[in-house]
């Protein structure tokens, strides 16, 4: 599974999901390990390439915004962002320092929607 995943550019977990969904046929060896037949790999390699986001990030949501506030919350820093609805990000203190985050700075907020939660700023 691992070798097939590398060839296809996906994770082994993705291959297991494809198998459960009927999108991938696997075989079992004598130790009951899943094996992906070469013809399945050939079939899947012929698929169109996945969409590229333009860089190494997989997040699809990007906003160019101004920083409203930078507040220490324990060992993290809450960064309030100027958006139509209140939006904040929490980062480590080291990240806030490295990014030189301060009120008024212009930043590009990049996030995955599945990791987004609403907070009061």
Image (cartoon, rainbow, N blue to C red):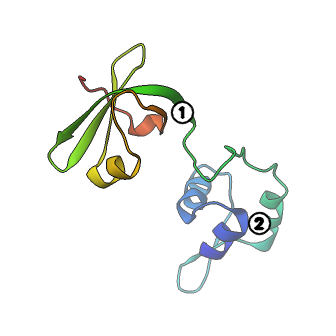
Q: Nearer the viewer, residue 106 or 64?
A: 106
| Secondary structure at numbered mark 2 | helix
Q: Report the disc number at residue 52.
A: none
Q: Report the disc number at residue 61.
A: 1
| Measured Cα–Cα span from mark 2 to mark 1 | 31 Å
Position of residue 22 measured from the top left corner of the image (x, y, whole percent): 65, 51
Mark 2 or mark 1: which is in front?
A: 1
Q: How crowded is the residue under tag 1: few (<14 C-alpha within 10 Å), some, or many (20+)?
A: few
Picture quarter containing residue 100? top left
Upstream in the sequence, badge 2 or badge 1? 2
Q: Going 53% across and 28% down the picture, which residue do you hit? A: 64
Position of residue 26 measured from the top left corner of the image (x, y, whole percent): 66, 67
Q: How crowded is the residue under tag 2: few (<14 C-alpha within 10 Å), some, or many (20+)?
A: some
Q: Nearer the viewer, residue 75 or 102?
A: 102
Picture quarter containing residue 2? bottom right
Q: Is residue 26 above or below residue 19?
A: below
Q: Nearer the viewer, residue 53 or 83?
A: 83
Q: Is residue 27 above or below residue 88?
A: below
Q: Residue furthest bottom?
A: 30
Q: Going 52% across and 28% down the picture, which residue do you hit? A: 63
In the rendered image, which residue does mark 2 sit on? 41
Left or right of 5, for residue 33: left
Left or right of 42, for residue 52: left
Position of residue 120 measured from the top left corner of the image (x, y, whole percent): 23, 23
């Amino acid at each position: 599974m691992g070798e097939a995943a590398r060839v296809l550019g996906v994770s082994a977990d993705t291959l297991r999901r494809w198998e459960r969904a009927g999108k991938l046929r696997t075989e079992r060896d004598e130790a009951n390990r899943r094996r992906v037949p070469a013809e399945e790999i050939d079939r899947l390699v012929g698929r169109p390439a996945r969409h590229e986001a333009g860089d190494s990030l997989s997040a699809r949501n990007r906003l160019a915004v101004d920083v409203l506030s930078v507040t220490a919350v324990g060992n993290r820093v809450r960064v309030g962002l100027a958006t139509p609805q209140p939006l904040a990000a929490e980062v480590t203190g080291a990240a806030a320092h490295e990014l030189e985050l301060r009120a008024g700075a212009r930043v590009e907020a990049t996030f995955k929607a599945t990791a987004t939660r609403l907070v009061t700023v």
